[in-house]
Image: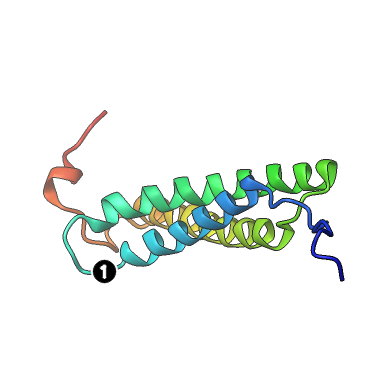
Amino acid sequence: MDTNEENNTPPVNSHSVLSLALGIFTILFFCIGWLPIPFTGFVCFPLGVLFGLLALIFGIISLNRIRKHNHSGRPMAWIGIIIGGFVFVCMIGIALVVIAMLIFAPNSIHVPPFVQNFQI
């Protein structure tokens, strides 16, 4: 082999790396939100939803760019899409269950007094 041979590996798509990183942050925020530390759920769950949505969006963008420009990074994009999509759907499901419980069975969960007297 010649030492002057060029390496013909395609460049890694930066959006796929970003999608993977956002997917990892999504899992971290989703898991940290369940810790029994005060106010972690109020901060971590919305950030988990946001990062999950962003991982999903950047993963889809990166798959399109990988196809158009013949880049590498397809597995990273798919991992970001799967993680981000799964956690995003779980968070939406949790929010819908809590809302449904508040609407259809308001006496089944303990609601603090300041929330019970709140009116819009």
* Above/below status of 30 relative to 53: below
Q: Which residue appears farthest toward the top when viewing the image?
A: 120
Give the side of residue 56 with respect to residue 75, left or right: left
Query: Crowding near pointer 1: few (<14 within 10 Å), some, many (20+)?
Result: few
**What residue lies at 26% left-to-right and 69% top-to-bottom?**
35
Quarter assignment of residue 61 = top right
Q: Which residue carries the number 1 mark?
A: 35
Residue 12, x across and y down, in percent: 69, 52
Q: Nearer the viewer, residue 82 or 116?
A: 82
Q: Amino acid at mark 1?
A: Leu
Coordinates of residue 50 in the picture (x, y in percent): 46, 45
State the residue in front, 19 or 10: 10
Q: Is residue 59 left or right of residue 27?
A: right
Q: Most extreme residue toward the left, as rendered?
A: 113
Q: Quadrant of the C terminus?
A: top left
Helix, strand, or loop for circle 1?
Answer: loop
Residue visible at 40% across and 63% down in the picture: 28
- The image shows residue 86 at horizontal and vertical percentages of 57, 61
Residue 17 point in image, percent of width and height: 59, 53
Is residue 54 found left or right of 100 in the rendered image? right
**In the image shown, does 7 or 32 lie closer to the viewer?**
7
Residue sitting at x 54%, y 46%:
53
